[in-house]
Amino acid sequence: MLTDGPVDSPAWLTRERAAGMNRPMSSIDAVEARREAALDQLKAFLAIPSISTDPAYRDDVERCADFVLDEMRAAGLVSRRVPTEGYPLIYGEWSGAPGRPTVLFYGHYDVQPPDPLKEWRNDPFEATIEDGRIVARGATDDKGQCFAHLAGVAALLADAGELPANVKFIIEGEEESGGEAIDAFVRADRGEMIGCDAVVVSDGPMFAPGRPSIVYGLRGLAYCEIRVVGPSKDLHSGHWGGAVANPLNALAQILASLQDPVTGRVLIPGFYDAVRPLEDWEREGLRTLDFDEAAAARGLGLEEFWGDPERHVLERRWARPSLDVHGVVGGYQGEGGKTVIPSTALAKVSMRLVPDQTAAAIVAALRARVEEVAPPGVVVEVVEMNGCAPMLSPPRGPVADAVAGALEDVWGVAPVLQRHGGSIPIVSTFLEALGVPVILAGYGLPDDGPHSPNEKFEVENFVNGMKTTVRLLERLGGAG
């Protein structure tokens, strides 16, 4: 039993109780009554620059962990810090409904760096309300979304004094810097502390404004560096050009050999061998989705989308593997010209994976391809940096259906069942270690701009996230 610290009511709930607002009410009314106070707490959460990738912000990340711990205790959860070799995990639970289901909510309290700062309209760590949107680093990824779960639970406990189902929370501080700590914890715990009937994750977008979705599949990831080494030092291109292989030229040839320039098909032998095709119902679902391809392209400043014309653009984004170059390093990068043959060149490359591909097999295939096409005169190396497995979770079942019902209760429309092209490494670990469904139901929008300047989160989506949390618990507890 956890006994790590007192369970207190937050000041804003204490004030409301003193004003006579602790009367029984519907869950929706309970959330509405506390929306402004919850929004103020979210602003305080967003004000902490919890940038886990930069050691200079270590104290701020630790302070943010304490903030989450305090909020859990104030909500009425028995909570504690779980120490790790990195930043702590914050765990909380309410287990006062024996015999009823237990849902584990996952989120992360760390954020990406705000750079480039000059592109922000306001201080990225001073949350600003603009046209019904809260703008700040972490607004949608993931502070706003995970706080919606906690604020919903807090509102329900404050109003009713109990929950219709059991809840657990595990909030990490390293999602944006690898997530090694929580991965190790979940694999070691094997459900002893975080055992549950399902995991619910809100760390991504809905299908469209007003169209909630349940994501049942994510792509995996294999991230590598391709390193090319030539002469022992940079050389004058006038003295040595034509006689010494240029590592940047060689790297360009290697990269060009990896992908068809028209269809985008990856040309690594064996790359598609293990790809699991879509089910018939998934293909039919893609055809029936209200997706305006031309408008979506224009929204990105494009005339049209690129890739395999035989496949729906959403299939290419969600359920097909891909390869992308993220950065090329080598030679002179300053202003003006410098005629130099660089001694080394490097490219950062990732491959998104789908069931049943594995990072180990794909990286081995990439390595073989690079060695095959590398021109003479250079030495090549493929270094695996990080990766994660793809995920598929059943889109139907008791908890998934409860989530779908809660979303429809709040948004007034049945959620879209979809995959998503991104990767959340811990999701596949939850599936493997806990053996329970993982349901992803994000409250963000496709244009929220996570990792970008002026990241935003719709205030109504934050409030609806609170409402969805309480309706989910009611449905799990039999009230739906």
Image (tube, helix red, strand yellow):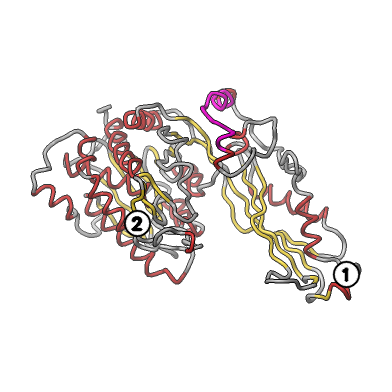
Q: Label 2: few (<14), some or many (≥20) within 10 Å?
A: many
Determine if residue 193 is in view.
no
Horizontal side, residue 16 vs residue 67: left or right: left
Q: Kindly identify the residue that appears in the image at 27 percent across and 43 percent down.
A: 152
Q: Is the magenta stretch mostly helix, strand or loop?
A: helix
Magenta residues span: 282-296
Instruction: Give coordinates of residue 203: x percent, y percent.
Output: 43, 46
Residue type, numbered disc 1 = Gly
Q: Distance between the residues labelled 1 and 2?
A: 54 Å
**Which disc is residue 241 wearing?**
1
Question: Does residue 27 belong to the magenta stretch?
Answer: no
> What residue would you read off at disc 2?
127
Q: Does the magenta stretch include residue 295?
A: yes
Instruction: Work out whether residue 153 or residue 428 is closer to the camera in this orientation and state it.
Output: 153
Inspect the image, locate mark 2, and give the three-letter code of the amino acid beneath it. Answer: Ala
| Residue displayed at 34% across by 55% down | 128
